[in-house]
Each structure stands twice: as C-alpha cells, then as structure tokens.
Amino acid sequence: MSRHFLLSAAARRLSVREVLGMSDAQAFERFRAMRWGREGEAVCPACGVAEQPWFLPSRRQWRGRACGHTVSVTSGRMFAHRKLPLQVYLGAIAIYSTAAKGLSALQRSRDRDVQYKRAFVMMHKIRERLMVPRDATAPSGEVQRDGASTNGSVRPENRADERVDRRLAENQNPDQRCVLVMRETHPADDPLGRVGGKRTLTVIIGRENQTDVGAPAARFIAPGATLSADASDAYDLRHGRYARRRVNHQHADRAADGTTDKQAEAYFSRFRRMQIGQHHTFGVSRPARYANEAAYREDTRRGSNGAIFDDILAKCARTRPHRDRCGDRQGNTARPELLAA
C-alpha cells in the first residue's frame, strides 16, 4: 500500500524554524522576489513607472526617477505602514500555511506573543488576500452542491414546558447563514488520472431554499454543467439550464447511477472541523472569508507546505489592501455582509 502524500517528504518543503530564523536581508529578498520577481525592478505605486529607480541601501527603499516617490518592498500592499520586522510577517504566513484546519487568532497571539487584536487583524488580512484574487470563473462539467448552516445554534430552555419549536423561522437565530459550496470535480476520463475535487467555490446565502440557492447557480455555474445534489427541495429548480442528478441519503450515500455529492460533503467536513476546533463562531460579516479559507485549504491539500507558503506570500505581496480592513486596530469594525443573494 502506497504512503499517503501528506506523510511523504514531498509534502514537507517548508520549515517554520527556517523562516523564523531568517535575517533582515533574507526576509527582504524574499518579499522582493514575491512582489517583483527575482530579477524584476521595483514599480512605483504612485506613477507606475519602472525605469531603474534608485536603490537606497541604508533604508532598503527605492526612489522613482520620474516622480521622486520613495517606495519600500511593502508600499501599497498588505503590510504597508508595518511596525514589526519582515521576519515576523513571514513567520505568521508560514504558521498559517502549515495549519491544516485553520488557525485561531488566540492561538496565533500565544504563539508569537502579540496582542490578540494584532493577531486577529493579521489573520483576517491574510484571509482577505485569499478572497480578493480567488478564481471565480464559472465551474463546468460535473459540479456538486450542498449547503450547511452556521451561526444558527439556539440553546433550548432548561424546562421542557418552556421550550419552543426551533424549526420555525421566528424561533431561529437571526444571524443564521448558509454556506453554499459548488465543487467542480475531475471528469471520469481525466487524462492525468486525477479524481475527486478540482476547484471549490463558496458563497454565503440567507437560507438553503430555492430562491437563495438558485441565484448563485445562475451567476457562478456555467450553462450546460451537470449539477449533483442531495434530495433537498432547495435544488429542484434550474431544469432547462443544467442537467440535474440527485441522491437521496435516506436510501444510500451513492445513487444506483453513481450520483454522489461526497466532494461537497468532504469540504464541509474540513469546514466544520475548522469551526468547532479553532474558531467556534464566525459572526455575521466574516463567514465568507472563513468559508473561502476552507475552500483554499481543500483545493491545495495535495500541494506541499512550501508551495502553499509561496502562493499565500505572493498574494500578500502583490494585492492592494482592501478598504474594509483599514482602521481595524483603531476600532473600525463596521463590515458589509458578503451575501451572494
């Protein structure tokens, strides 16, 4: 029996100890390579000109020839206006990359001996970097769908005669949301012999009903795709646009014709472990970030930790900061809720 990939040496291409032991010069070169390439010149974020800017060795900054603007390796990006050495941020990304089921801000604050608020803000900035450049092209081929509720737990009263029917809408938590997953799978005749999930796309909807489920399907799934789902009536619509396949889990996990939604359920297995084991609660404005993080970890589960680290670091070094994350440490907690419908 062959050894699982995660147990092999190919899965271990990064050492957190090595990253934390980097010097200032090594951390600087790593950030520079991820932002502009190893041989690339710095590009001024003010004028966009890259005509051999002057390099200031004492400050490790560049000065543009066209506008005279001074640029650092983090200017205009996620770690702009940083107050800590670059090794600290590299270490944060390395620890985040090696956490298979996610990482809570409280554990992060203890690992690095920083305030909880600083760790919370940094973790959400990294999740934002995974959300902004994600591949949102329409899944095609066979797409498995499923939904799971979050923030919906309502504790029953102690006395039985005081309990209410928690199935009714008026007795449910108003913060309850549904994570809808759409997972494109590899075809049965894949030339490389790949099986299982190919790409995972998640959105947040209000409830798992026909109205809320139907809108993301028309927006995100390519026409002609084959949709596999369970027997819930929330997936009864979209007859003419897509081919539909269903499996009734009261009778079997896999239908007689081979229809299954196991890849969608595999995503929720990781998502629930991340929720229960690490974060416990997601709030109202942040479930989309957590759901996308679980999707990213599920899609990259066959990659080495070094490749995942390089990918996340490249996203942090190349994407601009999102306005929703500005002023976190100053109390700016107002966030728009990211609902797909």
Image (cartoon, rainbow, N blue to C red):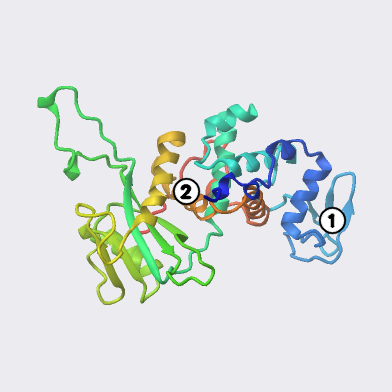
The three-letter code of the residue at mark 2 reads Ala
**Label 2 crowd bin: few (<14), some (14–19), many (20+), radius 10 Å:** many
Compared to 281, does 208 lie above or below?
below
- Label 2, on which residue? 294
**Residue 238 screen position, x and y as percent:** 27, 71
Residue 330 visible in the picture: no
Rendering coords of residue 294 (x, y %) = 47, 48
Q: Quadrant of residue 117?
A: top right
- Tell me the distance, in whole angstroms, between the alpha carbons under discs 2 and 1: 40 Å
Foreground residue among 72 and 295: 295
Q: Is residue 163 left or right of residue 72?
A: left
Whether pointer 2 and pointer 1 mark residues with C-beta atoms closer than 8 Å, the reply is no
Image coordinates for residue 266, horizontal then vertical, percent: 40, 51
Q: Secondary structure at mark 2?
A: helix
The answer to whether 23 appears left or right of 230 in the picture is: right
| Figure quadrant of residue 185 | bottom left
Q: Is residue 24 above or below residue 297?
A: above
Q: Which mark is residue 120?
A: none
Judge from the rendering whether residue 173 lies leftward or rightward of residue 60; answer left or right. left
Disc on the earlier residue, 2 or 1: 1
In this rendered view, identify the residue nearer to me: 194 or 341.
194
Residue 63 tag number: 1
Q: Residue at x 56, y 40 (%)?
A: 99
Residue appearing at x 74%, y 50% in the figure = 31
**In the displayed structure image, the side of residue 61 where residue 229 appears, left or right:** left
Which residue type does callout 1 highlight? Arg
In front of the other: 155 or 319: 155
Residue 168 locus on image (x, y percent):
16, 43
Provide the secondary structure element on which disc 1 rests.
strand
Q: Quadrant of the C terminus?
A: bottom left
